[in-house]
Amino acid sequence: ATWIFHYQDGEMCDQTQQPRQTTIYYHCDEEASSPFLYNVEERQLCNYVLNIHSPEACVPENSHNAACQWKISAKTGDTYYLDLSSLKGELIQTSNSSQNGYRFHYSPCQNLLHCYQQTGGYINVMMDIYNQQTSTCEHINAIWEDGRVQPQWNFDENMNTYYYSFHYYNGEKCSNGDDDVTHVNWWCDPNEPDYKVVNASEPLPCHFEINIASASACNATQEIKY
């Protein structure tokens, strides 16, 4: 698991005349005896990134989460439940209409994708970007860690529905040196008994997002029977 904190209220930067910004990533490291600063980068002028490894960032193993089931406490104080166990290991992919020959592959709650890269061979992952022209894995987006990434419950007033958002930070670095950020959003749609990929995109460099509609995301107030 990885936790991210973004601060935009630092000291004024002389060069940009804007407040300095700092993003801190707390990465789970179960082998570390105590937190330690892994590295510090200034990727843009007066914009800093700190990577900290710590055992305190690790989410305890949970057999229900590992089974693709979550209990979520929202900011409103309400409790919601998400059960994607019926889709565990399903191969979800975007359409073949991409002009650049790339598409997203995603296997919920399992590392079922055999990602082949010419430089590193095979690795099993949960989500990747597949290059159809070379039949290789272009980029690793996320690796399944037995449900340790806890989803967030969100309500979209414009769409008048809710969705669960998974934020993954354990993909590979992009060619520009940025850390991968991947958001997987599951939207409640009672008319989709299975699932439907609404869209997938890279809205910012090395920031990826896929939106999926499914009736499986509509059990928000129904407690999961373990």
Image: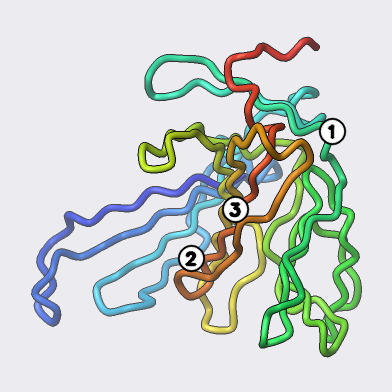
| Residue type beneath disc 3 | Asn
Q: Earlier in the sequence, mark 1 or mark 3?
A: 1
| Residue type beneath disc 2 | Asn
Distance of mark 2 from mark 1, alpha carbons? 40 Å
Q: Secondary structure at mark 2?
A: strand
Q: Earlier in the sequence, mark 2 or mark 1?
A: 2
Work out which quarter of the rendered image holds the C terminus and state it.
top right
- Residue matched to label 2: 39
Q: Residues within 10 Å of mark 1 (few under 14, many from 20)?
A: few
Q: Are marks 1 and 3 in contact (CB under 8 Å)?
A: no
Front: mark 2 or 1? 1
- Residue matched to label 1: 86
Label annotation for residue 211: 3
Query: At 38% from the left edge and 48% from the top edge, which residue is drawn?
Result: 5
Counting the numbered discs, the total is 3
44 vs 36, left or right, is left
Q: Earlier in the sequence, mark 3 or mark 2?
A: 2
Q: Secondary structure at mark 3?
A: strand
Residue at the farthest front position: 191
The image position of residue 118, as x and y in percent, is 85, 86
The image position of residue 224, as x and y in percent, is 72, 14
